Every structure is written in structure tokens, then in C-alpha cells.
Amino acid sequence: MNSPAWVARKRRWFREHWERTHELAACVVCRARPVDLHHLDYGNLGEEDYESLIPVCRPDHDRIHAAWEATPHVRRLGRRTATLVIVLEMQERLARSAAGSTGS
């Protein structure tokens, strides 16, 4: 995933993200930076739509791929839906952990 087309697409995605939000991209799970881009769909590599890529920090990107590999029942939902289910579970787990650490 280090082809010239992918490197150019990543640059375009980050520029488009800034133009849309006026914010630096942060991980959709934990809000950390820096981020990688995770594919929700694989189309023509280097020509992905903005909505087909999500920003995730490297540890959460690795966790998404590990969960993908470990959950064939979730994979059956398709890459986009399965990824969104995995991300939602990761967000909920993080929120529960944060709530537990505050004594709430």
C-alpha cells in the first residue's frame, strides 16, 4: 500500500478532510494522532471516494484488522458494515473503560 497512486490518494484525502472539517484528522476510535487510513471498501486503488476511507491510529488500525480476522461471522456482513460494527464496539469499549476509571 505504498504505491505512488496510494500515496497521492492519501494526500488528497487529508486535504479534502481539512477542507470539509477545518480540523486535522484524528482516529475515529480514540481521537489520537497521527492516523492511517483504513479502507471501508476496495475500489480502484488510488481512486477511492472520501467516504470509503476512515482515519485510525496505528494501534486501532491493527485492532480492526485483528478483529476482522478473528470474527468470520462479522466479516459476512461485508467489509464496510463489518468495519463499522468493529469500530463501534471499540468506541463503546473505550467509553466503558473511561467511565470505569472515573469511578462512575
Image (spheres, rainbow, N blue to C red):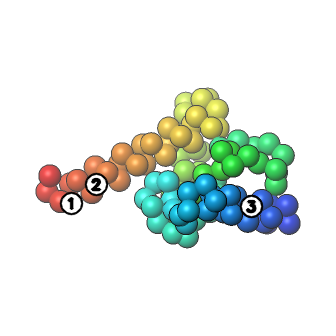
Please report contact status of discs 1 and 2: CB closer than 8 Å, yes or no.
yes
Could you tell me the amino acid type at mark 1? Answer: Ser
Q: Is residue 86 left or right of residue 78?
A: left
Q: Which mark is residue 101?
A: 1
> Which numbered disc covers residue 97?
2
x 74%, y 61%: residue: 12
In three-dimensional space, the C-alpha distance between marks 1 and 3, rounded to whole angstroms, equals 39 Å
Q: Mark 3: few, some, or many residues within 10 Å (few <14, many ≥20)?
A: some
Q: Is residue 97 above or below residue 34?
A: above
- Is residue 62 something that shows in the picture? no
Q: Which residue is denoted by mark 3 in the rendering? A: 12
Rounded to the nearest angstrom, the CA distance separating label 1 from label 2 is 6 Å
Q: Is residue 61 above or below residue 82?
A: below
Figure quadrant of residue 11: bottom right
Q: Residue drawn at (55%, 66%), measured in percent from left and top?
A: 24
Q: Foreground residue, 15 or 101?
A: 15
Under circle 3, the secondary element is helix
Which residue occupies 60% across, 29% down? 77
- The first of marks 2 and 3 along the sequence is 3
